[in-house]
Amino acid sequence: MAGFSLVCAVLLCATVGHAKPTLRKERVLHDPELSRKAHEDNKSFQYDHEAFLGKEEAKTFDQLTPEESKDRLSKIVDRIDKNADGYITTEELKAWIKRVQKRYVYENVAKVWTDYDLNNDNKISWDEYKQATYGYYLANPEEFEDATDQFSFKKMLPRDERRFKAADLNDDLAADREEFTAFLHPEEFEHMKDIVVLETLEDIDKNDDGYVDEDEYIADMFAHEDGGPEPDWVKTEREQFSDFRDLNKDGKMDQDEIRHWIMPQDYDHAQAEARHLVYESDQDKDQMLTKEEILENWNMFVGSQATNYGEDLTRNHDEL
């Protein structure tokens, strides 16, 4: 039984890892003002690092010394400064952040491509994906008697098929690189936005009435386990639901209101992050950054927490 449990865990991880629904933390784009407050309160720049470098590159920078980080950052600044005028504008930073995000998405697809392209024809058919992800479950349904496992696989298989077909623009039930990228990262593609909204609704709508009420909205982000009073931030979220999420004031969110919540049209993540980085680093307040200003604030752009909290605490500031 222990071996079987491990197989189940691996299969479930594979399913969720490659064809996961939109994760809770990915649903809502962070408000720039809230992002700024978080940096000031926690002195943690992980959000900035991942936006500026990408998740994988941020991990690499975590292993570097301050000197190495600054040296690499200096080279990155030269690449961002497209017109080579010695100044980094908000628009140049925005373009860089968008490029980093796009690179992460396509690198992620490249890493898993061979796991699914079983016949090496440079396409991934629905049957190939289904076999690679659900093959063991489909061949051995009797081994998945646990209700939780049954529910997970039964729920995810049709959901994946629906998402796959939405990404398959030419309806040949085979995804090329671009279509498979849309399948794995639907939030990045305009024609997949309806799927993201629908999956978000399905994740949160526990009573299956086709709407998200206030309690379901709160339960998605807070598990009230001890029976004590709700934290203040939860009370604030209830107010947010009433004032800003439930636009027609009927006590629940429909799909249009969910779309407005997770994909606000007046919000550009890259632009907000670029403005934040300029605001925090622009010492002379000219709305642009020099290389010197960026290097002076290197820990916000690339400095690792290990360096920030470790070496910095054991050195005199004059040494840094």
Image (cartoon, rainbow, N blue to C red):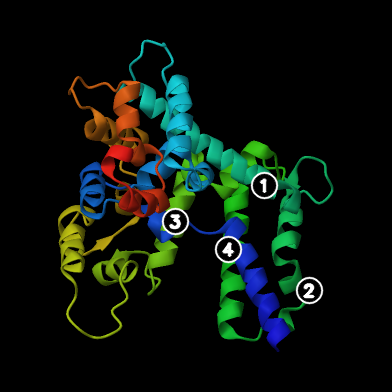
Given the image, on which type of amino acid does mark 4 rest? Val
Name the secondary structure under disc 4: helix
Answer with left or right where residue 214 lies relative to residue 137.
left
> How far apart in space, not on screen, are marks 1 and 2 (Cα)?
26 Å
Identify the residue shown where x is 44% and y is 15%: 82
Is any part of residue 267 visible from this angle?
no
- Image height check: is 292 above or below 139? above
- Image height check: is 77 above or below 303? above
Given the image, on which type of amino acid does mark 1 rest? Lys
Q: Which residue is mark 2?
A: 139
| CB-based contact (under 8 Å), mark 4 and mark 2 | no
**Foreground residue, 147 or 291?**
291
Query: Which-is-in-front pick, marks 1 and 4?
Result: 1
How many other residues sit within 10 Å of disc 1, few (<14), some (14-19) or many (≥20)?
few
Query: Which-is-in-front pick, marks 2 and 3?
Result: 2
Q: Which residue is mark 1?
A: 111
Q: Which residue is mark 3?
A: 198
Identify the residue shown where x is 28% and y is 38%: 318
